[in-house]
Image (cartoon, grey):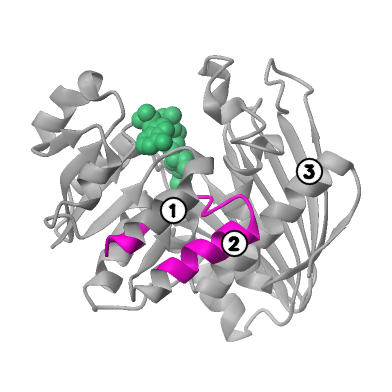
Amino acid sequence: MLDVAVVGMGWWGKTLVNLISKSSKLRVVKGMKRNPASEMDFAREHGFEMVSDYADVLKDPKVKAVILCTPHTTHTEQVIAAAKAGKHVFCEKPLALTRADAERSLAAINANKLHIAIGHERRFEPPVMDMMRMIQSGELGVPLQIEANFSQDKFLALPADNWRLTPEEAPAGPITATGIHILDLSVSVFGAAESVWCSVKQLGSPLTNGDTLAAMVKFKKGGHALLTAILATPFDGRFAVYCSKGWIEVRDKAHPSTPMGWTLTKVVTGDQRETKEYPPSSSVLANVEAFADAVEGRAVYPMPQDQMLANISALEAIIASARSGERVMLK
Ligand SMILES: NC(=O)c1ccc[n+]([C@@H]2O[C@H](COP(=O)([O-])OP(=O)(O)OC[C@H]3O[C@@H](n4cnc5c(N)ncnc54)[C@H](O)[C@@H]3O)[C@@H](O)[C@H]2O)c1
């Protein structure tokens, strides 16, 4: 059983506490919120101590790992401080907003021989795991091109000054909210990006930071990913990989916070279209449990650090391209 502290007790921090309460692999022993008064009942119900200072989390020997559910610009310094205190880290996405910051975080983790995991739960969706196995086995031939969409309208309910709508915390509109997940899956198929072109517009909402993103990512060792993320339309989640001997698509029926299952469609050249329905399961819980398995030596965490870095490199380039309107080359 891995004893963890959840840092940041907003939407996602509380989602994780609720999910972990059903786990036999992790236990929340501490929570941190800068103004904890509003969540004291929640902490009591779940049987953990709530503190208002990150330093109190880091000096507690009961806490073996931290789960960071905090604003994006705070991730790097919080990961580094946790690593210096000897705590393993599960960092919500994005690991950082720049490759240099992601490198600093990973260096601190590795220097202290700790584990790090990222909140990319889409990798843990059963149909996505099946899809990746089929692609990696070569049964669909050479992967050629990705088309993916992750859209939602949850942010329309946020106050205009919420951090998630600011250009500092959420540069390039929807990319840090949803687009980053399909960027991550694209990296897991094709590896590091070579260049990106991205456009973000405000078309159908009061979200002045932009509600509609289109990005084209060209990969060093493979084809392209055409990515769409919209914050002003109802939920949609779709990830399709076209390959030289067929294609495969996973469609989500609901947002990962309230899973309702998935549909996988596959066409192998010359065969009929096949469709498989998957029942709901929590990929978010599966991800934190995979982190616990890694920390406690039962399994290797399935997201390698080079892919964590490749994802943030591509993210940084997407942000730069959305700002400049130009194609951005990666190193
Ligand atoms: N994996 C997913 O699908 C998913 C879904 C939603 C959110 N997230 C991620 O979770 C993180 C939190 O997002 P959210 O929607 O819960 O935001 P939120 O605003 O609801 O919660 C953020 C929490 O962090 C606290 N906080 C702010 N600054 C802090 C600081 N310097 N130190 C400690 N705590 C601080 C806030 O008080 C709040 O409790 C983000 O990284 C976001 O991208 C991931």
**Which residue is pictured at 89% across the width and 43% down the height?**
325
Q: Which residues are magenta?
A: 84-108
Q: Is residue 221 visible?
A: yes
Rendered-image quadrant of the N terminus:
bottom left
Helix, strand or loop at mark 2: helix
Sequence order check: which comes first, mark 1 or mark 2? 1
| Residue 11 seen anywhere in this rendered image of the structure | no
The residue under label 2 is 185
Query: Residue 98 in magenta?
Result: yes
Distance (Cα) linking label 3 and label 2? 16 Å
Q: Is mark 1 within 8 Å of ligand 1?
A: yes
Give the residue number, with chain letter if any, for mark 1.
Answer: 119
Query: Which amino acid is tagged 2?
Result: Leu
Assess whether mark 2 and mark 1 are in contact (beta carbons under 8 angstroms). Answer: no
Alpha carbons under labels 1 and 2: distance apart: 12 Å
Discs 3, 2 touching: Cβ within 8 Å: no
Instruction: Work out whether mark 3 precedes mark 1 in sequence or the reverse, and give the earlier one.
Output: 1
Q: Are marks 3 and 1 in contact (CB under 8 Å)?
A: no
Q: Secondary structure at mark 1?
A: loop
Q: Nearer the viewer, residue 203 or 30?
A: 30
